[in-house]
Image: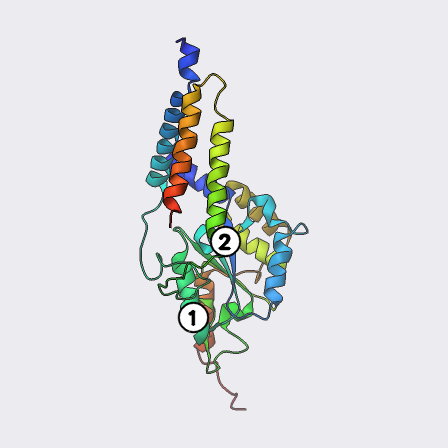
Amino acid sequence: MLDRLVRWARGKSPWVCHLNCGSCNGCDIEILAALTPRFDLERLGVLLEGSPRHADVLLATGPVTRQIKDRVVRIYEQMAEPKFVVCVGTCGVSGSPFYPGYNVLGGVDAAIPVDIYVPGCPARPDAIAYGVLKLLATLNSQAQELVEEIEATRDTVGLIYMPEEIEEQRESAQTPGPGPSEN
Amino acid sequence: MTAAGIIYHPVTAFLLCMVGGWVLYTLGRALAPVTRTVGGKLKTYACGENLEQDSFPNAYDLFHAAFIFTLLDVIALVIGTVPATAMLWLKAGYLVVGLVAIVILFKD
């Protein structure tokens, strides 16, 4: 009973904290677009919070560099449990186009565990909203209904990736292809 | 004293607030996940920076004057909101205690 209450409350008011690991600000602007009235994530109770101490979800953009890594880890550690990370933008997903530069360690998951990946350069606000909804759908039935409605009315393939899908893609990218034809 | 008088008495209200606060605190503590104090969890939040312990000199200009006025404001507020039926020596006593506190704090 109490668990259900906590789950309901958490799903109804996820506070997000935005962390720019080294993004060009493209994805940051799109996060603002997702939060403000046009896409209006706030209607689902999502509130932008200044401090990770008060946040449930970390919206991280940009690649993780050697300089930022310790700070990203520290900020993640300072969030209260349970905590979730939504990685926004291609740089945050894979570190590209700067990876494997000497100073770039990779995407956000090079430093902290990520729950949802939202690719794009920049990521579209509707994709960010869909990613956050997908995260909320595990906690909140209203978000689950919205996700089902979105998936029924539009093509959502490639809008977001779950950690296992990203892992699969990375493995397949490392697998050598069939090689040049002998003809 | 009537039942309503007991219920609406400031002491009763204070005790009820204390009990309410304790219930909320206990409930929150029971529902919250177990805290993991790893890494920088308990460090001061400084936008991810590793803030080392430091001390800052207490060198606010006019701090003493501001503090005296704060105390005077509190004294004035308390005396101004004392019920009219309260005994006069209680108000006067609070005023005297407040002024003695100011003298002790700032005698140097």
- Kind of residue at disc 2: Leu
Marks 1/2: CA distance? 43 Å
Callout 2: chain:
B
| Residue at 40% from the left image edge and 10% from the top image edge | B3
**What subunit carries mark 1?**
A
Q: Give residue A176's quadrant in the image.
A: bottom left
Left/right of residue A124 with respect to residue A162 in the rendered view:
right
Mark 1, secondary structure of its residue: helix
Q: Are marks 1 and 2 in contact (CB under 8 Å)?
A: no
Q: Which residue is mark 1?
A: A69
Residue B38 % position (x, y)? 31, 59
Q: Is residue A138 visible?
A: no
Checking the image for residue B62, the label placed there is 2
- Seen from the viewer's position, the closer of residues A63 and A17 is A17
- Compared to residue B106, the image places residue B79 above or below, namely above
Q: Is residue A97 above or below residue A27?
A: below
- Mark 1: amino acid: Lys
Please state the horizontal and vertical placement of residue A135, each as a whole percent of the image.
Answer: 49, 52
Judge left or right: residue A10 versus residue A35: left
Viewer can see residue A173? yes
* Residue at the image position 50 percent from the left and 43 percent from the top: B69
Q: How many marks?
A: 2
- Of residues A133 and B15, the one drawn nearer to the viewer in this rendering: B15
Name the one closer to the observer, A19 or A84.
A19
Return the x and y of residue A81 as percentages of the image width and height.
38, 51
Q: Residue furthest top?
A: B2
Q: How is the image coloured?
A: rainbow
